Amino acid sequence: AAGVIQSPRHLIKEKRETATLKCYPIPRHDTVYWYQQGPGQDPQFLISFYEKMQSDKGSIPDRFSAQQFSDYHSELNMSSLELGDSALYFCASSPPTGHPEAFFGQGTRLTVV
Amino acid sequence: DAKTTQPPSMDCAEGRAANLPCNHSTISGNEYVYWYRQIHSQGPQYIIHGLKNNETNEMASLIITEDRKSSTLILPHATLRDTAVYYCIVFPSNTGKLIFGQGTTLQVKP
């Protein structure tokens, strides 16, 4: 079965650079979530999209932005990267109303040096 | 969103049942109980969810008390591959986001 695809799997950036993470949800899933997980921490909700509109917002820094495109894939844009942005970034998708469980991708490991 | 309380860690012998408790005393009537687990550095994995009835699937069973203030996730025959952090989450059906609190680190031992 198709799963949530995230790219790239690993990314190394320098401070003050920008990064773009991509997420391809499971086909026919209309909701996408983004999470950040620092070392030894629990996943922290960043932002979610439903039918290409932002549906909820968590602890996402102003330096970050995200969107969901017409094909339902999503991108997380991160600017002015800081050392503290080094983390695992997970994307998850969930199907239309009636099946609310979320399926997670394998994550993108971002290292800021 | 209702707050959940889980023990920080538990051990279980391989082949035995693992019973992971979760307290959610402030849960409201339209909030479901969801369980996820995260094996080291992998994406969280959905296990099971329920509203008020007990649920069972190929991975686990979920027992929810009649007053819905607590629940127990049961892994009937734990294996070493079940070693993970288990998260109990409650949120309204079909809305909102999954908020991961401090889960239970389950260590399955040979």
Image (cartoon, coloured by chain):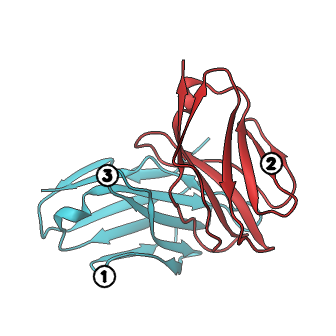
Chain colours: A cyan, B red
* Residue A8 % position (x, y): 32, 51
Disc 3 residue crowd, few under 14, some 14–19, many 20+, Cα 10 Å = few
* Residue B59 % position (x, y): 71, 36
Answer with left or right where residue B77 lies relative to residue A66. right
User: What chain does badge 2 belong to?
Assistant: B
- Is there CB contact under 8 Å for labels 1 and 3? no
For residue B63, the mark is: 2
- Badge 1 amino acid: Asp
- Quote the CA–CA distance across marks 1 and 3: 22 Å
Above-or-below relation of B26 to A22: below
* Residue A28 % position (x, y): 64, 60
- Quote the CA–CA distance across marks 2 and 1: 41 Å
- Quote the CA–CA distance across marks 2 and 3: 32 Å
Q: Residue at x 31, y 52 (%)?
A: A39
Quarter occupied by the N terminus of chain B: bottom right
- Badge 2 amino acid: Ile
Q: Is residue A72 visible in this depiction of the protein? A: no
Answer with left or right where residue A91 lies relative to residue A95. left
Q: Residue at x 35, y 52 (%)?
A: A108
Towards the viewer: B72 or B56: B72
* Residue B22 % position (x, y): 67, 54
Q: Residue at x 22, y 73 (%)?
A: A79
User: What chain does badge 1 belong to?
Assistant: A
- Is there CB contact under 8 Å for labels 2 and 1? no
Callout 1 secondary element: loop
Q: Residue at x 57, y 49 (%)?
A: B7
